[in-house]
Image (cartoon, rainbow, N blue to C red):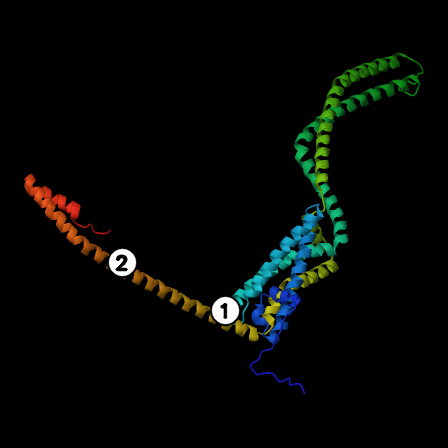
Amino acid sequence: MQDNTQAISRRESYTPTRWTRFLWWLSTAEPEILADCMIDRNRYAIIGMTVLGTWSFATLAWTYFFSTVVDNGVIAVLLGLFMGGIILTIDRALIKGISKQQKNRWLPLLFRGVLAGVIGIFMAQPALLYLFNKEIHVQISIDNEQRKKDKRQKQDSAWYSQKAPLLQKRKEMQQQLDDRYAEVSAARESFIRETDGTGGSKKIGLKDIAQAKQREYLKLETDYQQQRNGLLPRIQETDSLLRLADAAIQKEQSTFEALLNDGFITRIEALNHLVEQNRSVAYRYYLLVIILLLIELLPVISKSMLPEGTYEEKVKLREKIEKELSRRNHERELALQELYNQSSFEQDADFIRNFIAESGENKKRKMKTRLQEWEEENGGFDDLWNEMKAGYLSKQEN
């Protein structure tokens, strides 16, 4: 019969799959240590799944955001992947720093939660724009019409100081013509009634009174035509200036309307208007914000909620070992450097002693030779002493 008994000291041999190692990498775990921790393997795989979900959500949200900004879909995807990678890096840094063994761990945990919340709220915006896309475009149409009206009112207010004097001037000139024309019409009517017998004299035909009224009518008609010929060009000139002002207003209005779009900020404003005006939309909006915010907070929440196991203990012990080894290696390196410096010092000291000892006899011979030369030269002692100091005495090291 085959013997399946294994030695007590033999450890379990576990080889994680590539997928498992990838999840462990997402959860910032050390695979060499985690492979020996049976219970913690699944915990860190769960944390890795939450990071993967947040990473995927961030990539999709940022891709949709950039699709509202740029027209090239490939660029939007690349930018979405880039920003998703940044969010992944931030999430890995957040969960790597969470440890239940830390002192005052609630303060860094609160900071990490606030940071994750800010990122989550911003990432929730593109997702909400995508979910409420149809309703938002309807609201954009309404908002743009209101923007056109507001722009026209502002233009009218801005041009009022220029148009008001022209309008008042035209009104006065037109009123003068209307008043004079009313007088001409009244005179003509009075003349016609006098000729047909319905007037004051009750005589039919062109009698004296009728002729007098005819002269009055013709005089008023002549005055009216003269005044009309004088005022009409001025009225036309004023109308031309008013048309130029209206053309400038219309041109500016057309330029403004061409700038209206459905970009990211415009959609955000439309979404805010929807939330303000519709309670059912507001309820679902805040509910979705909470859900999407939880997606971003999942890695931090999962790392904080899951209990610590043997992996954390092994990491802590391994870190102590590495610190102790680093300290001892530093001490050994320092001792070796001190030994090297001391040995070099001793060797250099022996060399200097030997050098000075060997050079002493040579100095004496040179001194005797110079003294003999000095006696023959019969020179001054001070000059000789200065020469000997400069040529034969050692100089102190600085």
Where is residue 301 drawn, in percent x and y? 61, 68
Amino acid type shown at disc 2: Asp
- Secondary structure under tag 2 reads helix
357 vs 298: above or below: above
Residue at point 55% right, 81% down? Answer: 9
Crowding near the residue tagged with mark 1, few <14, some 14–19, many ≥20 C-alpha atoms within 10 Å = few
Relative depth, front residue between 29 and 92: 29
Measure the alpha-carbon separation of dots 2 and 1: 56 Å
Q: Which quadrant is home to the N terminus?
A: bottom right
Residue at point 77% right, 15% down? Answer: 226
Residue 104, numbered circle: 1
Residue 348, numbered circle: 2
92 vs 70: above or below: below
Q: Quadrant of residue 222?
A: top right
Q: Is residue 324 left or right of residue 50?
A: left
Say whether marks 2 and 1 touch (CB < 8 Å).
no
Where is residue 291 drawn, in percent x and y? 68, 63
Q: Is residue 336 left or right of residue 320?
A: left
Residue at point 47% right, 69% down? Answer: 322
Relative depth, front residue between 247 and 6: 6
- Secondary structure under tag 1 reads loop
54 vs 165: above or below: below
